[in-house]
Amino acid sequence: MAIANVSATQAPEITVASEPAGREGRLAEIGGNVGSVWRGWWTWGPGNGTWNLRIPWNVIGVDSTVVITASEIDANGNRFVGDAAFQVSSIAPGNGVVTFKVDIAWGSPLPMRTDVVVFN
């Protein structure tokens, strides 16, 4: 879901997500100052331009470290590297949500997948 439009193009919207994960399930000691690691993915409907996007996920807190990657996907949802540049920046975790900026540098809307790793 787009929360702010930075350019006059089409905003990506979530179409599919990985299975949800809760804080209470299968936690394991990771080591160092990391107690748990979570991974999830979301596919988005076609979009292009620069957008601030949000992903709600209950494992994210204000002190989480969140890493997000973005890739173009084909009609089957498979990631690939095409001619369009996808860039993720300004990742800001909050309580139960992460907000981030994505720039899809292409003249027409493209579908994408975001992969998210959360360290707590």
Image: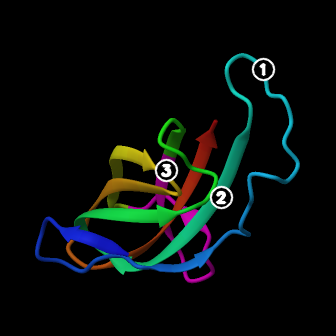
Q: Between marks 2 and 1, how big is the CA–CA gap?
A: 21 Å
For label 2, the residue is 40
Comes first in the chain, label 2 or label 3: 2
Give the amino acid at mark 3: Thr
Magenta residues, start to end? 68-82
Counting from the top left corner in percent of width and height, residue 39 is at 68, 51
Neighbor class of circle 1 (other Cα within 10 Å; few <14, some 14-19, many 20+) is: few
Badge nearest the viewer, 1 or 3: 1
**Mark 2 touches mark 1? (CB < 8 Å):** no
Is 62 magenta? The answer is no
Q: Is residue 49 above or below residue 64?
A: below
Neighbor class of circle 3 (other Cα within 10 Å; few <14, some 14-19, many 20+) is: some
Comes first in the chain, label 2 or label 1: 1
Q: Closer to the camera, 81 or 56?
A: 56
In terms of secondary structure, where does tag 1 sit?
loop
For label 3, the residue is 69
For label 1, the residue is 31
Q: Is residue 2 above or below residue 89?
A: below
Neighbor class of circle 2 (other Cα within 10 Å; few <14, some 14-19, many 20+) is: some
Badge nearest the viewer, 2 or 1: 1
Give the amino acid at mark 2: Gly
The residue at 49%/52% (across/down) is: 95
Q: Looking at the rendering, in which quadrant would you find the N terminus? A: bottom left
Give the amino acid at mark 1: Gly
